[in-house]
Each structure stands twice: as C-alpha cells, then as structure tokens.
Image (cartoon, helix red, strand yellow):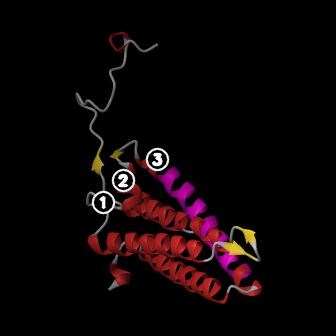
Amino acid sequence: MMDAMPGSLLVKCNLALTAVFVAASIVAAVAFTSPWKTIGVVVSLSCFTVGIVAFLWGYWTAVQRSRTDNISVAALYFLVDNCAPQSVARLMNGALGVQVVVAVATAISRTTTDGRTGSTLAFGVLAPMMGLGLNGLWGATHGTFSPRQFDDSSEVPLQGSASGQD
C-alpha cells in the first residue's frame, strides 16, 4: 500500500528516522548515563543534519518549480491545501508532531547534567528540522500545486514605466 504512494521512500525514511530518534531520546532520558547521553546527542544532530540537507534540497527544487507552479510555504512544508494525498500528509505531519513532542518532553525531563545547568537532551529540539526538511522535499518533488497564472493576476506586479519600478 505505501509503495503505491508517490515519494514512498521519503515517507519510509521519515518514519524510520523518527523511530530511531524516539528510541534514542527516551533511552537517553531514562538511563541518563554517559554512553546513552552521547548516543542521544549523535542521533539528534544526525536528524538535524538530514533535515538541513533535505530542507535546502526541497527549497531549491521548490524555487525551480515556482516558475510554473503557485507554491505556498504552508503547502510545501506542512503538505496542506491538497498538496499531498491525505495518507502522505498524515504520516509526514504525524512524524513531525512526534518529533516535536518527544524533543520537548525529553529536553525538559532532565534540566541538569551533573549539577551544571543544561542537559545534553536539549540537543533533541534540533531533530524536528528533519520532519520539516523531509516534508519540504516531499512537497517540492511530489506535491501538487496550482499552476501560476500571469494574465492580469494580482500576484505578478506590473512591468514597465506604469509600475514605478526602475
């Protein structure tokens, strides 16, 4: 069923990486010992890195598509306005929601580290960038957007001397 969805590889990657992030964050928060705290940081930073790469790739692709398609930021990064099938939007936004909840919950679960202010679990708040980036990449590569209209459109400013532009 999921293989028939457009961009199913991105959806599967998002779900798998979200599961790894959740498991590593929960174990790091519960055990709160040196190897698990380090693993939690590495996983969080890895998710952040994947998110940055996916975000930039998706943004680049969306900019190219925006020449012919009317792309909104909300549709691109949250897969709304029929940009994606409901099943894809639900899975991708659900993974993003889980990432946010787990990141915040684990970050506030331990407010100190060895008596010093702060916690290595705070690195988890970077991980939801992965969900945003993968949503944007999915939207840019597989999303459905209305075509850009240039005929007497209020979206396109007038060109020439009447517009007051130099």
At which x and y percent is residue 98?
45, 75
Q: Name the residue under label 1.
A: 80
Q: What element does badge 3 sit on?
A: helix
Reply yes or no: does residue 57 show up in magenta. Answer: yes
**Residue under numbered circle 2:** 74
Q: According to the image, label 3 marks what residue? A: 64
Mark 1 neighbour density, 10 Å: few (under 14) some (14–19) many (20 or more)? some
Q: Establish if 31 lies above or below 85.
A: below
Mark 1, secondary structure of its residue: loop
- The location of residue 65, given as percent across then percent down, is 41, 49
List x then y, in percent, for residue 165.
42, 15
Local secondary structure at mark 2: helix
Which residue shows up at 66% across the image and 79% down it?
Answer: 40
User: How far apart are labels 2 and 3 at the CA level?
Assistant: 17 Å
* Labels 1 and 2 touching (C-beta < 8 A): yes
First along the sequence among labels 2 and 3: 3
The residue under label 3 is which amino acid type? Gln
SS majority, magenta? helix
The quadrant holding residue 92 is bottom left
Which range is magenta?
38-61
